[in-house]
Structures are given as structure tokens and as C-alpha cells.
Image: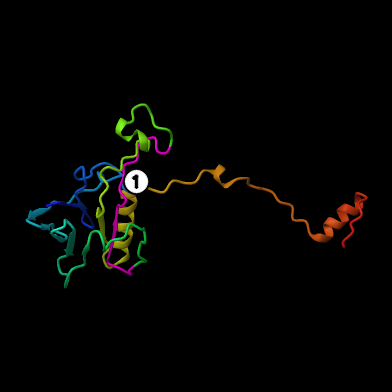
Amino acid sequence: MNVRVAALSPTLVRLERQGPRGFEDNTTFMVVNRTSFPMVPMQQNGGTFTTAFYTVVVTVDGSGGASATITMPGSAGPVWQGNLETNVSSWLQWPAPLSAQVYAIKDYPRFYVPPWGPSPASSSVDPALASTNGYDFRNDMDGDTYIFLLGTDLNGWHQSRKEFIMLTGATPLVPDFAFGTWFTWWLALVHRGRLRARSSAGITTVYR
């Protein structure tokens, strides 16, 4: 099967289509941390992956496209189902509290970011990646999907938000210099005050 299922936590599942260079374990532009998650024990029987918290059934069509269905104990039906390519967005549109029980997002386009980022590449850059400054796009694959099981209460919603930040990393603060010149003291001069100041200096103001 060209799909890997990873039960990262009781409320987070990763469904990954195999890329041109295999399954992706490196960090990417979107995902910087997968190793801090507890990893839930899982049993596999063909395309069915079962944990104590949910069951994932994966189907692959003749062209290699993959779909999945997730059910949870006690649920009347699937809590999520869809195609990993066409039914999942790569845009971050986190649902409002209690508006959804599941949120899915895919890491696409998926590429590796070198430690030096957009700065000029170091001498240790792979010669094959010199033209992209060390950025590696060779294992890009549509359908690397992360499914957050938000639950039905605010505790589950907040827990999934924490897991998203753990997965993608916190947003860095903008440095002060990026805001330009800061005025920490401002003298509010009204129009009449400006006229008095100009008159005392011997300046005549004429309005046309």
C-alpha cells in the first residue's frame, strides 16, 4: 500500500501518500515537529488500522489515489471521510469552537527547508540542491494529510489547537525594527495653538 497511517496521538492522525523518494520523515516548511507526539499503539489488517480511540480504513484506487474513512467508538457513522487529494485543503482555516468535530489539513506543497533558510547556502549544501539554495522539493506529494479530532467540547477543541502548534511550530514574533519609526511622545497641537505660536514668532499666516 502506498499510504502510511500514523496515529500521532489519541486526537491526531496522519495519512500520507508515498512520495517519489518514499515516505517523508524530515521536517517540512509546514511541519517542524512530529517526534514529540506520544504515538498511539495501532494494529493493521490490510487497509484497516485500529487503535483504542479510532479506526482508519484506507482504500487506494487503480491510479494510486487514496481515500480514507475514520470512525470512533460509539459514533453512529464516520466522523471523517474523503479523498486525500481532492477533499482536503492546504489552507489553514481552523474551525470556530464547537462548529466541527474534525479538521483536516494537508502539507502541500511539501518541501524541506534547510537550516539556513533563505540566507545564502552554506558550503555543506548538497550539490543536487545548490540551484534551490538547499530547499528540497524532490519528495513533494499531494495528500500528506493531518486530521485533528476536535471532539464535541471546548477541551477537545483547545487540545487540538495545542497539537497543531506543536506540529507546525509557534509563530515567531516580528522584531521591533520591522515596525519602522516609533513615536513615544506626541504633542497634540490644535489649529488655534499653531496660530499663536506663529504670531509670537513674528510670522504672518495668510490663507487663500
As displayed, is residue 124 above or below residue 178? above
Q: Residue furthest top?
A: 123
Looking at this view, is 177 or 1 the one in front? 1
* Residue at the spot 18% in from the left edge and 63% down from the top edge: 70
As displayed, is residue 144 above or below residue 76? above
Residue 56 found in image quarter: bottom left
Residue 119: image x %, image y %? Answer: 43, 35
* Residue at the spot 30% in from the left edge and 33% down from the top edge: 128
The residue indicated by pointer 1 is 29
What is the magenta range? 98-118
* Residue at the spot 21% in from the left edge and 67% down from the top edge: 79
Residue 123: image x %, image y %? Answer: 36, 26
Q: Residue furthest bottom?
A: 76
Q: Residue 174 vs residue 184: left or right?
A: left
Looking at this view, is 110 or 162 the one in front? 110
Q: How many marks?
A: 1
99 part of magenta stretch: yes
Q: Residue furthest left?
A: 45
Amino acid under disc 1: Phe
Residue 171: image x %, image y %? Answer: 41, 48
Which quarter of the rendered picture does the C terminus lie within? Answer: bottom right
* Residue at the spot 44% in from the left edge and 46% down from the top edge: 172
Looking at this view, is 192 or 103 the one in front? 103
Question: Regarding mark 1 in the picture, which secondary structure is present there?
Answer: loop
72 part of magenta stretch: no
- Magenta stretch: dominant SS? loop
Residue 50: image x %, image y %? Answer: 11, 58
